[in-house]
């Protein structure tokens, strides 16, 4: 007889349920994970993982009640377990949750609210369930609208885990030793003015990087290929917190559209006000730049599985003309949309964009002071609460301090601060905390970081007054300032706008 068919649940199921409520011992949780969860599923701090049992705001708590400062969770956008978001989801779940083939106000009201944050031409929404699903759908839209196949992506890009996106994510497919790049995928240089092909001392890095895309298009045409889309994260995250030079997207879009393609801006990691000065990171390029398709995810539901693709009416009608109906069972369901509306409300009510700008500026300022003290810090870059600290063993040669970056994040973890390292050399410390992060939190991180760097530098024999490094930094800072890409002191909106205008005049 099947368990439970007599109306009584078996003792072992009751026992398992009781254990899950009380909490398993950490070792038991690890054992069960190793037994039942795919071995390729990565876990933070694998040699001694943290077992998190609750969270609130910018803090997470382990099974012993120890509090950790979360500097990396860009999913809990407005703060872990925000009461307004939790309430909105619970109340709607108690009323109705169903698919979108029924009329429901939440869907259209949320679409209207979301569109109001975007340029007018981006007016049609498709709701889905994850950033990967959003980017996959964006590719389908581009293929149908253009009738072309080829995609241009960036070095070190990551756009998702489904098959179509692994093909356009060098961050992933370069890890496969026997991987063969798709003949329909073209990889352009990452617009990284610190470590990339054209650096901060280049007179016009935006044009130089955009010309690389133009060259790719010309070579593709010679081979009989046609471009469907260029896709880029508005700020590269896994690629190492890379901030494209102003004017780059405008010129790329011009080249791609002339070739019959569209521009896809991936805002999955950096949207919804994280950059502070703007709601969307692509807007940092200037008001004269509007993508053809924008994808979003992660922060949209503050941890609830929800995402969206927004595009133009022309692209949407072309997608419909294929004759294939598009349907998504859970995308845009009433609960998801109620949660999405609550997230937008909290961002506005608590001025989280303003907080991202102010605290992000404070964080970069205190990190810049650490850079003057610590030769291991090669570069500090970011916008709002999206900040990268690149560690190098030599500021002239830019030798990646990969092992040292890993040591930093493990040492911080022991002091109850959660940070991660990424980039092609895994040497960029990534700050992308919940937007309720405070200046006190920034001070705490730096207070913990300072002695760790000092100890590592002593072990490496690095000295803060290295004259060659110092002179190189002076030259680099001058050229960065001339390019409008310095440091990145992003609270001065007047200076930013002047820089944008100068760049647009040049390009």
Image (spheres, rainbow, N blue to C red):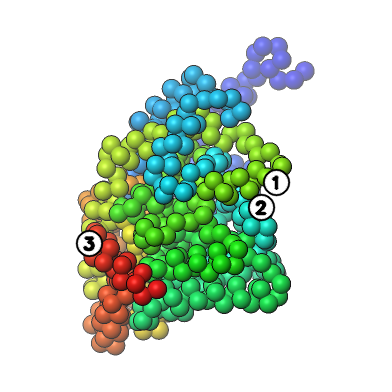
For residue 6, say whether it is visible. Answer: yes
Residue situated in front as seen by the camera: 183 or 427: 183
Residue situated in front as seen by the camera: 114 or 52: 114
Q: Residue 184, how many percent across, how many down?
A: 68, 66
Image height of 79 relative to 389, above or below: above
The label on residue 494 is 3
Q: Residue 492, how many percent across, how many down?
A: 22, 61
Mark 2 or mark 3: whose residue is earlier in sequence:
2
Report the residue marked by disc 2: 144
Quadrant for residue 345, please give it.
top left
For mark 1, give the secondary structure.
Answer: loop
Residue lying farthest right? 1
For mark 3, give the secondary structure.
Answer: helix
The label on residue 322 is 1
Q: Residue at 23% x, 65% y: name it.
A: 495
> Distance of mark 2 from mark 3, alpha carbons?
41 Å
Mark 3 or mark 1: whose residue is earlier in sequence:
1
Residue situated in front as seen by the camera: 160 or 107: 107
């Amino acid at each position: 007889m099947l368990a439970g068919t007599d109306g009584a649940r078996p003792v072992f199921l009751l026992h398992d349920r009781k254990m899950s409520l009380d909490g398993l011992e950490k070792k038991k949780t690890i054992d069960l994970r190793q037994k039942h969860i795919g071995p390729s599923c990565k876990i933070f701090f694998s040699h001694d993982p943290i077992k998190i049992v609750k969270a609130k705001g910018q803090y997470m708590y382990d099974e012993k009640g120890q509090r950790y400062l979360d500097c990396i969770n860009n999913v809990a956008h407005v703060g872990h377990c925000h009461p307004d978001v939790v309430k909105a989801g619970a109340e709607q779940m108690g009323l109705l949750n169903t698919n979108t083939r029924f009329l429901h106000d939440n869907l259209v009201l949320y679409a209207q609210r979301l569109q109001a944050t975007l340029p007018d031409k981006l007016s049609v929404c498709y709701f889905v369930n994850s950033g990967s699903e959003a980017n996959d759908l964006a590719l389908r839209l581009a293929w149908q609208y253009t009738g072309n196949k080829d995609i241009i992506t960036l070095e070190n890009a990551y756009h998702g885990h489904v098959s179509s996106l692994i093909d356009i994510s060098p961050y992933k497919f370069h890890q496969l030793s026997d991987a063969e790049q798709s003949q329909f995928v073209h990889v352009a240089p990452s617009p990284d003015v610190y470590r990339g092909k054209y650096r901060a001392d280049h007179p016009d890095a935006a044009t130089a990087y955009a010309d690389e895309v133009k060259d790719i298009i010309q070579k593709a045409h010679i081979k009989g290929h046609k471009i469907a889309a260029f896709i880029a994260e508005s700020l590269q995250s896994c690629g190492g917190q890379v901030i494209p030079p102003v004017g780059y997207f405008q010129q790329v879009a011009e080249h791609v559209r002339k070739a019959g393609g569209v521009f896809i801006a991936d805002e999955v990691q950096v949207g919804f006000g994280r950059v502070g000065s703007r709601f969307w990171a692509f807007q940092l390029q200037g008001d004269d730049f509007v993508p053809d398709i924008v994808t979003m995810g992660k922060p949209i539901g503050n941890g609830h599985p929800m995402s969206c693709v927004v595009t133009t009416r022309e692209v949407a009608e072309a997608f419909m003309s294929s004759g294939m109906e598009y349907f998504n069972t859970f995308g845009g369901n009433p609960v998801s949309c109620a949660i999405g509306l609550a997230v937008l409300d909290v961002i506005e009510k608590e001025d989280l964009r303003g907080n991202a700008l102010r605290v992000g500026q404070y964080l970069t300022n205190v990190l810049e002071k650490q850079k003057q003290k610590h030769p291991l810090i090669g570069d500090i870059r970011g916008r709002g609460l999206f900040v990268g600290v690149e560690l190098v063993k030599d500021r002239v040669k830019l030798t990646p301090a990969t092992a040292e970056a890993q040591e930093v994040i493990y040492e911080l973890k022991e002091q109850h601060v959660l940070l991660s390292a990424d980039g092609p050399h895994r040497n960029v410390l990534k700050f992308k905390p919940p937007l309720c992060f405070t200046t006190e939190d920034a001070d705490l991180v730096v207070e913990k970081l300072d002695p760790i760097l000092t100890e590592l530098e002593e072990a490496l024999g690095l000295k803060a007054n290295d004259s060659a490094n110092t002179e190189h930094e002076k030259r680099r800072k001058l050229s960065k300032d001339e390019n409008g890409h310095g440091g990145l002191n992003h609270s001065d909106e007047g200076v930013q706008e002047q820089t944008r205008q100068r760049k647009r005049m040049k390009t």
